[in-house]
Image (tube, rainbow, N blue to C red):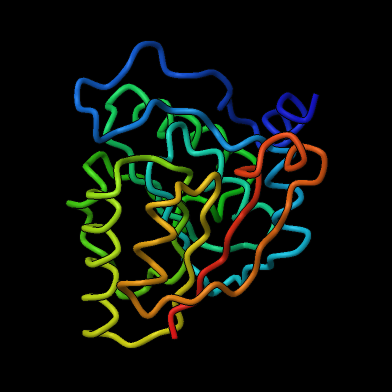
Amino acid sequence: MKEQYYDQLLNIHTDGKQKGFHPSLHYNRYEPTPYEALEILFEQYVLKNSDRLVDFGCGKGRLNFLVHHLFGASAVGIEMDETFYEEALENKKNYIKRNREGMENIHFQCCLAEEYKIDSKDNRFYFFNPFSQQIFMRTINNILRSVEQKPRDIELILYYAPEDYIFFLENQTAFELKEEIILGDLYEKNPYEKFLIYHLV
């Protein structure tokens, strides 16, 4: 129900899953974060309109449009699949028919996560278990190098975080767990149903 409601509200189409698997075992199949989960996240975790969020493995762009709609925040979607990238661009065309500001504040790039050049304005990064630990580590190291060049407040938002992501962050980086947002009934059935917010100290 919420899937249809929000897609209609935002004038986009982001439902559906990837058919088949990517030929590389390093990348997981596309699945959008449920709107129901995002509702709970953004009731407790607030973005500012000065924030710029990067969604690695953005698919059709759901998170980009929602954070702009809710907070006026900028968002960059990184997607390696050309078909999903094209669908994200189509969704942007439809979204800006109702919200012209989205033209300047919502962006998409078709590339591998580890090849994305972290912009000095990027300060919030979203991961829904999109790829292997090796790719995650390379991507985090790109973020850290960017912060060395332009110091700023950085936070990571992890949904369905694998244990190896958590181990790496807590043992090999200066990121510290700031907040854990549990998804109620879903969490009781599956301990991965939560958001972890990490802050760079």
Residue at 57%, 38% in the rendered image: 95
Quadrant (top left, top right, bottom left, bottom right) of the C terminus? bottom left
Q: Is residue 193 left or right of residue 122?
A: right
Q: In the image shown, does 165 or 47 lie closer to the viewer?
A: 165
- Residue 79 is situated, as x and y percent measured from the top left of the image, at 33, 38
- Residue 5 is situated, as x and y percent measured from the top left of the image, at 77, 29
The part of the image, by quadrant, that contains residue 98 is top right
Residue at 81%, 46% in the rendered image: 184
Residue at 43%, 50% in the rendered image: 55
Quadrant (top left, top right, bottom left, bottom right) of the N terminus? top right
Q: Is residue 8 left or right of residue 178?
A: right
Where 113 sits versus 177, above or below? above
The part of the image, by quadrant, that contains residue 44 is bottom right
Where 201 sits versus 88, above or below? below
- Residue 154 is situated, as x and y percent measured from the top left of the image, at 44, 76
Q: In the image shown, does 107 or 199 lie closer to the viewer?
A: 199
Residue at 38%, 67% in the rendered image: 169
Please state the total of marks drawn on the protein image: 0
Q: Is residue 120 left or right of residue 34?
A: left
Q: In the image shown, does 83 or 103 lie closer to the viewer?
A: 83
Where 25 sits versus 127, above or below? above
Residue reaching furthest to the top: 19
- Residue 101 is situated, as x and y percent measured from the top left of the image, at 55, 56
The part of the image, by quadrant, that contains residue 121 is bottom left
